[in-house]
Image (spheres, rainbow, N blue to C red):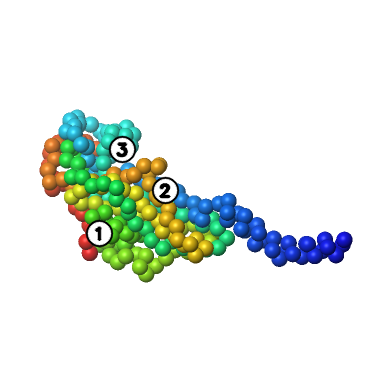
């Protein structure tokens, strides 16, 4: 009897950790992902409304102060650039490898052209890691050069490996021009040699981003904490998609 118990303990000491890891892997996701979708990102803090809106001059510096809450609550659409910070944490006993990050486009439409709200950026630009151009035939992650323009496909020469508990934050600058896009992000991973794709969106919903319109019904500029009616479509942030 004692020999049986000792033999069992010996087997468990050898196989126990592997069995425990297998059970944990089966009950957990390969990675956990959290996102931050800031209303302001980098050097761009501009929004477009579908309708012509009259805004009285007031001491409201960023557009969010005019809206009172996130501009998206008023069906406002971010113009030209949308940032997202993605934090990925490895969850399995074997390394999980991120092999690609790309945009999935659901629909396109003409740019939003009712009212443009353009505000001078507040604060410094965050350090960007990769960017995605929705106008690209292959809207996948690209490195960003010193001029802030998109360069080589990031994951053609790189991958990100995460062991259990390891964390990687990815700052993504998604850009659009001339068109309104509805989209989300797709992250490709290898988990135990098997390919999987993870969807990244905004609280279960696709994201909307518009390029500059040729003209607007209203253009408001924000200088010295006051909204002023004036200017034209040339005030719209310029795209930085090309090399």
Q: Earlier in the sequence, mark 1 or mark 3?
A: 3
Q: On the rendered image, what quadrant is the N terminus found in?
A: bottom right
Q: Which mark is residue 149?
A: none
Q: Which residue is mark 1?
A: 137
Residue found 65% across the figure and 57% down from its top: 20
Q: Earlier in the sequence, mark 3 or mark 2?
A: 2
- Give the distance between the C-alpha atoms of the residues marked 1 and 2, in whole angstroms: 25 Å
Q: Nearer the viewer, mark 1 or mark 3?
A: 1
Circle 1 sits in a helix, a strand or a loop, which is it?
A: loop
Q: Quadrant of residue 16?
A: bottom right
Residue found 35% across the figure and 68% down from its top: 156
**Residue 131 in the image, given as x and y percentages of width and height:** 31, 58
- Give the distance between the C-alpha atoms of the residues marked 1 and 3, in whole angstroms: 27 Å
26, above or below 221, in the image: below
Q: Is residue 143 left or right of residue 23?
A: left
* Pick the front one: 185 or 226: 185
* Pick the front one: 165 or 60: 165
Q: Is residue 165 left or right of residue 174?
A: right
Q: Which residue is mark 2?
A: 35
Circle 3 Cα neighbour tier, 10 Å, few/some/many (<14 / 14–19 / ≥20): some
- Give the distance between the C-alpha atoms of the residues marked 3 and 2, in whole angstroms: 17 Å
Residue found 17% across the figure and 40% down from its top: 113
Residue found 34% across the figure and 57% down from its top: 102
Q: Are marks 3 and 2 in contact (CB under 8 Å)?
A: no
Circle 2 sits in a helix, a strand or a loop, which is it?
A: strand
Q: Which residue is mark 3?
A: 72
154, above or below 61, in the image: below
**Residue 154 in the image, given as x and y percentages of width and height:** 35, 64
Circle 3 sits in a helix, a strand or a loop, which is it?
A: helix
Q: Earlier in the sequence, mark 1 or mark 2?
A: 2
């Amino acid at each position: 009897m004692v020999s049986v118990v000792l033999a069992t303990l010996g087997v468990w000491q050898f196989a126990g950790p592997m069995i425990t890891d297998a059970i944990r892997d089966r009950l957990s996701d390969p990675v956990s992902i959290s996102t931050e979708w800031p209303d302001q990102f980098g050097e761009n803090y501009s929004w477009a409304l579908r309708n012509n809106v009259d805004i009285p001059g007031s001491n409201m510096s960023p557009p969010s102060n005019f809206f009172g809450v996130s501009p998206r609550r008023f069906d406002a659409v971010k113009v030209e650039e949308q940032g997202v910070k993605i934090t990925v944490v490895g969850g399995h006993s074997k390394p999980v490898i991120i092999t690609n990050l790309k945009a999935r486009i659901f629909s396109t439409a003409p740019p939003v052209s009712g009212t443009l709200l353009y505000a001078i950026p507040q604060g410094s630009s965050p350090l960007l890691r990769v960017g995605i151009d929705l106008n690209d035939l292959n809207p996948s992650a690209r490195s960003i050069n010193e001029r802030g323009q998109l360069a080589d496909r990031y994951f053609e020469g790189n991958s990100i490996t995460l062991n259990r508990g390891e964390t990687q934050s990815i700052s993504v600058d998604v850009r659009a021009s001339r068109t309104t896009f509805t989209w989300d992000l797709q992250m490709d991973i290898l988990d135990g040699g098997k390919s999987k794709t993870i969807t990244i969106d905004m609280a279960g919903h696709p994201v909307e981003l518009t390029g500059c319109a040729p003209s607007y019904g209203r253009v408001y500029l924000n200088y010295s904490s006051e909204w002023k009616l004036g200017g034209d479509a040339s005030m719209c942030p310029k795209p930085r998609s090309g090399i």
